[in-house]
Structure formats: structure tokens, C-alpha cells
Amino acid sequence: MRFLHGAAPAHDLTYTDVFMAPARSDLGSRLDVDLSTGDGTGTTIPLVVSNMTAVAGRRMAETVARRGAIAVIPQDIPIEVVANVVAWVKRRHLVYDTPITLGPTETVGDAIHLLPKRSHGAVIVVDDAGRPMGVVTEADTTGVDRFAQLRHVMSTELHTVPADADPRTGFDRLSAGRRRLAPVVDATVGWSGC
């Protein structure tokens, strides 16, 4: 988009403040425009998450950024918080989901509260150095006292994927181990994601 006659507004604009002026294009038809993503997901339209406080937060921005979309952070959020969110999202891995982590002495209640926060539905239990030592899923918390420590309910049979593995290798490891998720382990840092 560009403003006519080089005018630059001194304040933010909304749809009611502007008039979209038609212009000539070299395209023969709007059907000739291809907005599909190059990641093989089949997405054909751009995605922009609305600037609603209950919708466009850090987690949503991270998730949609992996698919080339954007989230508009609400305007009533302090600029320092917005800067921190943007920096955090830009540090996220482009393929692996950011895991939810808790320590072994955290409770089942803590895990139950966090499980819906990620699509993989798991909490990775980490030691003091941040290395994965177990995984807790919703099934592990069913019928368990909410004050039980995670070290008593976690699965310790971890199938990990090296951070430098290509997606096919990761899929093959998950398939061979009959797992739906695995911590992604980086030899230098300890691990990267899920």
C-alpha cells in the first residue's frame, strides 16, 4: 500500500480514515494471484491474527509465525512488553514447538493447568540443568492426586530427536518408537523443543 501524493499520516489510521483508490495492475485476473505458502501445508490465503487481547498473545504469535502469518499485538499492551514478545517469538525455532517444562517436584495440578497451552499436550520434566528427564501427558494425570509430584507420574522412557535431524528422520524416530512427540535434544545446549 502507498499513500497518494507522498502523504504520510502523523497518526494511526483505521479503515474509516482511508479510502482505497483503485489502481492499474499487470495481472489479468485476481485468480492469477498465488498466495499459497511454500511449506507444503496447502495454505492459500494470508493469515493475520486480530489485535484482541484474549487472542493475539505470545503463544498465538509464535504458532502462526511458523506458517508465515502474523499476529497484531493489541495496542493497549505496554511497548516494553510488545518488544519482549516480539524478541521472544523471533528466538523460537522455525520447526519445533516450544515445550512446556516443569521440574520433577512440581505438581500434577501444575501440569494439568499447562497441558492445554500447547498442541502436543505434554509437559517435559527437566532437571536442574534443564535437561529432559521425563514427559507427562494428560493420560498420566488421570485419576492422580493433584498434589502428587511429577517425578512419580512421568514417563522416563524418552525417545529424543537430535536438533540437527531433518523432519523425515524425526518422523521415522517417532514412528519406530510409536510415539507422538519427542524432546528435540541439542548436544551443546541440552535441548531445543518438541
Image (cartoon, rainbow, N blue to C red):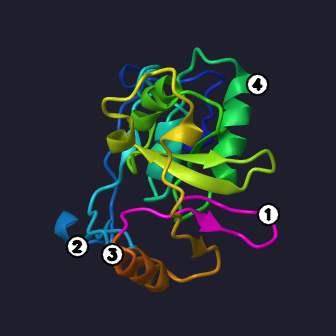
Amino acid residing under circle 2: Asp
Callout 4 secondary element: helix
Determine the residue positioned at 61% across, 28% down. 9
Which is nearer the N-term, disc 1 or disc 2?
2
Residue in the image at 46% along x and 39% along y: 60
Cα distance between the residues tagged 1 and 3? 30 Å
- The residue range painted magenta reads 179-194
Mark 1 Cα shell of 10 Å, populated few (<14), some (14-19), many (≥20): few
Query: Secondary structure under badge 3?
Result: loop
**Circle 1 residue:** 189
Is residue 34 visible in this depiction of the protein? yes
In this rendering, the answer to whether 42 lies above or below 2 is: below
Q: Secondary structure at mark 2?
A: helix
| Magenta-span inclusion, residue 193 | yes
In the image, which disc is placed on residue 32?
A: 2
Q: Any magenta on residue 21? A: no
Distance, label 2 to label 4, CA atoms, is: 42 Å
Specify few, some or many for label 3: CA neighbours under 10 Å numbering under 14, 14-19, or 20 or more: few
Amino acid at dot 3: Gly
For the residues labelled 2 and 4, say whether their Cβ atoms are less than 8 Å apart.
no
Mark 4, residue position: 80
